[in-house]
Image: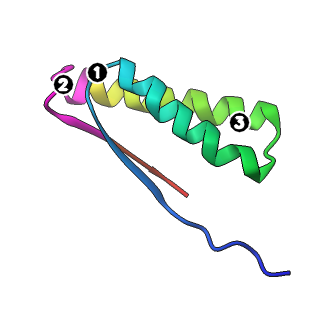
């Protein structure tokens, strides 16, 4: 059986806190078929949420017209 080819997921959202939930939902959907344990999934979500929060608040000053970007494999 061959290994799945890693794909990069890239998302761009406006710098609004409610968009963090959207990105979290995408991460959850990506992780589900990979059968990653619950604790690891939890900490990946925390890291993603923290990174997006910092980008939106400190980098983009919560300007919804500025995009916050995330990418993961």
73 relative to 36 in the view: left or right: left
Decide whether residue 63 is among the magenta residues.
yes
Report the span colored magenta: 57-68
Q: Name the residue under label 2.
A: 64
User: What kind of element bears circle 1?
Assistant: loop
Q: Are marks 1 and 2 in contact (CB under 8 Å)?
A: yes
Q: Say which quarter of the image contains residue 36.
A: top right
Q: 42 or 13, which lies in front?
A: 13
Point out residue 9 in the picture as x, y percentages from the top left corner. Answer: 47, 55
Q: Say which quarter of the image contains residue 67.
A: top left
Instruction: Specify which label sits upstream in the sequence, 3 or 2.
Output: 3
- Label 3 crowd bin: few (<14), some (14–19), many (20+), radius 10 Å: some
Tell me, for residue 50, which label it has, or none.
none
Q: 59 or 1, which lies in front?
A: 1
- Label 1 crowd bin: few (<14), some (14–19), many (20+), radius 10 Å: many
* Residue at the image position 57 percent from the left and 40 percent from the top: 27
Outermost bottom residue: 2
User: What kind of element bears circle 3?
Assistant: helix
User: What kind of element bears circle 2?
Assistant: loop
Q: Do the residues labelled 3 and 1 touch (CB within 8 Å)?
A: no
Position of the C terminus, as image quadrant, is bottom right
Tell me how far mark 1 sits from mark 2, CA to CA: 6 Å
Q: Mark 1 points at which residue?
A: 16
Q: Say which quarter of the image contains residue 5.
A: bottom right
Tell me, for residue 41, which label it has, or none.
3
* Residue at the image position 53 percent from the left and 40 percent from the top: 26
């Amino acid at each position: 059986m061959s290994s799945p080819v890693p794909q990069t997921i890239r998302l761009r959202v406006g710098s609004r806190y409610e968009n963090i939930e959207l990105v979290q939902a995408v991460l959850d959907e990506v992780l589900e078929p990979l059968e990653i344990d619950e604790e690891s999934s939890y900490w990946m979500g925390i890291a993603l949420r923290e990174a997006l929060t910092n980008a939106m608040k400190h980098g983009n000053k919560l300007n919804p017209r500025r995009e916050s970007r995330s990418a993961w494999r």
